[in-house]
Amino acid sequence: MFPFSFEWIWDMSHMVFHGGLWYALSIIGLGMTYCILKATIDTFQGKGGHHE
Amino acid sequence: MDSALIPVMDDALKPKGVQRCPIWQFALWICIFGAILLWGVYAMFLCWFKGLNQTNMNDAYGFALWIWADLAVIALGGGAFFTGFLRYIIGKDELKNIINYAVLIGFICYSSALLILAIDVGQPLRAWFIFWHANVHSMLTEVAFCLSCYFGVLTIEYIPLVLENRQIDKVPFFHNLAHNMHEIMAIFAATGAFLSFFHQGSLGGVAGVLFGRPFGYREGVLIWPWTFFLFTWSAAACGPCFTIMITKLTEVITGKKLVKQNVIDLLAKISGWMLASYIIAKILDTVYWATVTVPDMGYTLKHFYSNPVYGIWILFLEIVLGGILPAIILITKTGRNNNVTLWIAVVLAVIGVSVNRWVMVLQVMAVPILPFESWYLYLPSWQETATTILPVAYGILLVMLSYRYLPIFPQERELNPID
């Protein structure tokens, strides 16, 4: 799974499979980190006060 | 807790300006489907504690009812990725009125698929092995990667809906979080479309690369057999049909119009053209397979349909009734606009894709390959059946809860004004 795992080989199959996996996980992770951080900052700035 | 408080809390959680059934009626249906769910959970624990001897799988059927259910729900859940792709990437703005429900259905389908796999692996505590010790020459590894990542994406798409619940939305952080997630949803939707394309395809690829199983084997391009592309195509075509079918069913049960006709019409039209192009490709694939691949491997087409259970009728059901007929209905304006024919079309498309997954999983196993073999037939055990019904009950419960407490249908208030 990681290049430092003992099973890892620097061949096309490993790079394509795990490259795709880490690419998708990075987008999901970075996207959610951005949303959570921005929501925290927005909340501290007093945005999002509820009005029904 | 004071029982008089329950209706008050229930009212406070419901979206504003919409009508829902009385709490006792809701609770009654929750209990009924909850009981079915518990039956499935009991069977699930039997499989986990006593092992896969609880199933009727054997040396001939390493893949059985569970894998069919998996492939079918993944195809039917394809409505989420394709509707998301149309809404966020292609820019079909009208679909914003059905995307929430498509996401919910997709979330249910994919979580069900993962639940079934968790039972099927026999050793769920070792499920992480597929990531850690990945076999990079297996299509199923790619399926596992994409399936779990895409479930993550669907969860991310479903979270803002939960956060928009009337009470949760009052918390500023959750309100801001939902808003921010909506803002960059196109990125998540694009990632979801990328992941879906590959895992839908690889599920088809699994059957297509089985050189020793001529019923499933297909030629193709580079490492991808034609089934790779056909599975993705059929999921994109029939997934939205399932979304329409469930939306229509919800409308019948609630007695309300929940989505405007122009939205249904647009999704049905796109789905119809996708289905029409898919079924042409499927027919070409079947003809080439029957006239070139099969004779080259020393068989005739008749050999694969020589059992009463797996007669030629199954091919007719899949291609003509489950493909050509719904495609014709959906690409014609009169067919789409007539409620009866629309119902027929979406139900047939759902049956068609489910039959396709059935034959590519189970008929592949049933067909005799060696001269001394006969047809292997299989009947699932009650534990397999119960654990396959379990996700259906879970899905109904989640739809009930989401419909009652979350703003799933943006047009509901406008279509059903309360005096």
Image (cartoon, rainbow, N blue to C red):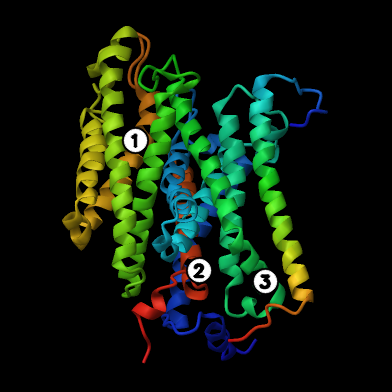
Instruction: Name the foreground residue: A9 vs B396.
Output: A9
- The disc at residue B176 is 3
Q: Residue at x 28, y 19 (%)?
A: B288
The residue under label 2 is B402
Residue type at numbered disc 2: Ser
On the same chain, marks 1 and 2? The answer is yes
Chain identity of mark 3: B
> Above or below — where is B129 with respect to B73?
above
Q: Nearer the viewer, residue B4 or B193?
A: B193
Using the image as rendered, state which of residue B296 and residue B68 is in the foreground: B296
Q: Residue at x 19, y 55 (%)?
A: B333
Circle 1 sits on which residue? B356
Determine if marks 2 and 3 fall on one subunit: yes
Q: Residue at x 74, y 20 (%)?
A: A10
Separation of residues labelled 1 and 2 (CA atoms) = 31 Å
> In the picture shown, does residue B164 fall above or below B372?
below
